Image (cartoon, rainbow, N blue to C red):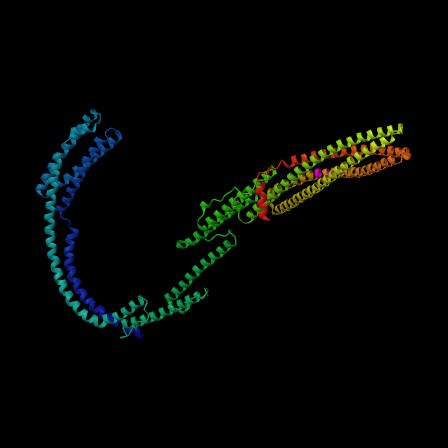
Amino acid sequence: MNASTRAPRLQSKLLGAVSIGLAVVLLCALAGLASAWLKLSTEVPPEVAHSRDAERLQREFRGQVQEWKNVLLRGHDDALRKRHLDAFDSEGRLVQQLAKGLASSPDARTREQAQTFVGLHAQLQQDYHGALQAFAEAGYAPAAGDTLVRGKDRPAASALDALSTHAAQVAEAAVAARSQQARQTLLLCAALTVLAAVLLLMGLAWWLRRAVVQPVLAVEAAARAVAVGDLQHVVQVRSRDEIGRLAQAMQAVQSTLRGVLDAQAAMAQAHEAGSISHRMDASAFPGAFGAMVADSNALVDAHIQVKMRAIAIMGRYAIGDLSQDMERLPGEKAVITEALDMAKRNLGMINGEIRRLAEAAAAGDFSQRGDSARFEHDFRAMVDGLNRLMQTTELNLGEVSSMLRAIADGRLGARMHGDFQGVFARIAGDANTTAAQLATIVTDIKHASGSIHSAAAEIAAGNNDLSRRTEQQAANLEETAASMEELTSTVRQNAEHARQANQLAIGAHAVASQGGSVVGQVVATMGAIETSSRQIAEIISVIDGIAFQTNILALNAAVEAARAGEQGRGFAVVASEVRTLAQRSAAAAKEIKALIEASVEQVGHGAQRVREAGDTMAEIVASVQRVTDIMAEISAASQEQSAGIEQVSQTVIQMDGTTQQNAALVEEASAAARSLEQQANRLIDAVDVFDLSTTAAARDALARAA
């Protein structure tokens, strides 16, 4: 009720004062302006219209002349020539129409010039059409056509220029007269309007400044403060009219805005502390402020929902689930969708590259490479790292395979060379150590085989020498038997024969002693050969054990590779090659061991027989000693000659049998020595298959490894 009674005060004052003043000013101004505007806006001077027609006439005439030039330039094409000729005639009709309109001008000179141009233009068209026949006869040559009509448009153009210039001058004079008349009318209206406006404005200015301007300036200052964010500006209410109520409303706006800002600050602090579900209470604010708060809450909800959705999808991507896609977001938010799509696409591409390389590696194909050019930054580094892994594995496994092939071919000097790292370095070291061990063992076998061969040759030579001495001893025994027969035939010569027998016995004793010494040497040599053979057998057993352990390790590696499935196929191939090599080494070791065991057995037999020959030679030495004693007794007591001769005969028979046995044993020892030599040659041939060109280097490497 109070507001409705106070409202008209300022409104009545303003409306009353402004209405009266404006009514006076507007009446004066409108009267003059209406008169001047009516003349200027509704009435177009005929002189101005004729000037515009003259200008248009010039444009159309130039267009007609240009169409004739088009006829000349494009005369070789009938369609184009006809089209431009029709345009030329159309432009000519329009020019005639405009010129005849100017011929009705109220200005005498304009009419005269227009009529002159009409005649000249008609003659021009006639001349141009008359030149068409000659132009066609000239083969529509542009130069010929231009020569036929050259200069024929100049009289009409000159007359048209004069007409246009004169029409413009007449229009300018008419416009100047009309403008002068309108200026006078406007000046009078303006003077009266200015006088009334000055008086009105002076009164209004004084009253408005006091009643309106100062309060409004105060409210304006408050509004400007609010506009720049200053809500602490104090708004004073000095009246109870509309301006006072405006000040009160400004105070209410400040209070409401401070409430909105406080609510926004509280929500910002809550979100900063992690409580992103906090929202402003839109019901605490009236009208548009409540709607603004609700919109702010909705905006925050929308952004948080988008972020949470993006975080959820990225979480799925982080654990490898690429099945989800981000919803298509509009406007600038589409960058989130594009970023997630790009992340999914890049993760899918890098996953595909990793899967392809892993499948190739599982299949034993390490020659595959990832396309790192398709990626950037860390993804490119990942693909480059996988490529380096594939390349390193391919090169290192190739080195292992090459070395195993070389060892399988007997080239024990082959080694793995290169900058190996980690497990590949251990594999290279173990492989090189294994090759060095094999080379050293084979070298030792070769040296032992040479020693066995030399010893067997020495045994054979000794046995041959022993055989010759035994044969000589048998001949001596035969002579002794003949002497004994002579002793039995004559007693008289008993003493002489006894003396001769004594001498012979002494010689036989020396020969038997020498034979016993040789047999002792043979026994020692056969013992050394037997010891060397046993050592070789032990070495071959070590080789067999190494081959067996290598086979077991290769078998275990093959089993592990089989458990690994496709991923272990490449290592299964390597393990198979190692196992094959170990089996071949074991087979060779078994063959060598069999040869050595046969040689040891034969050497044992030869040693046993040599020992038996030694025992026999000892018995021979003892028998010869007894013969010597008996011959001495024969010399001393011829009475016992018959018995002594009988004993000597028996002894000689025994010596002859023993000698024959010794000869047989020596033959057997010689055969055993030759067999041992043949077995040694076979052993040497067996180890010659290995290439030991770097045996010394291998031993050094093995020594350093130990």
| Along the line of sight, the residue nearer the viewer: 541 or 535 | 535
Which residue reaches farthest right? Answer: 639
Which residue reaches farthest left? Answer: 108
| Along the line of sight, the residue nearer the viewer: 164 or 457 | 457
Which of the 4 image quarters holds residue 122? Answer: top left
Quadrant containing the N terminus is bottom left
Instruction: Give x and y (percent) for residue 561.
Output: 61, 46
Going by the image, does 274 lie left or right of 364? left
Which of the 4 image quarters holds residue 280? Answer: bottom left
Q: Is residue 215 visible?
A: yes
Against 18, is 78 above or below?
above
Going by the image, does 121 lie left or right of 643? left
Q: Is residue 581 visible?
A: no
Q: Is residue 596 magenta?
A: yes
| x 42%, y 62%: residue | 300
Instruction: Give x and y (percent) for residue 68.
Output: 20, 33
Going by the image, does 337 lie left or right of 514? left
Q: Is residue 575 magenta?
A: no
Task: Give the extent of the magenta segment.
Answer: 594-598
Instruction: Give x and y (percent) for residue 260.
Output: 38, 68
| x 41%, y 64%: residue | 294
Instruction: Give x and y (percent) for residue 137.
Output: 20, 24
| x 19%, y 26%: residue | 133
Q: Is the magenta region chiefly helix, strand or loop?
A: helix
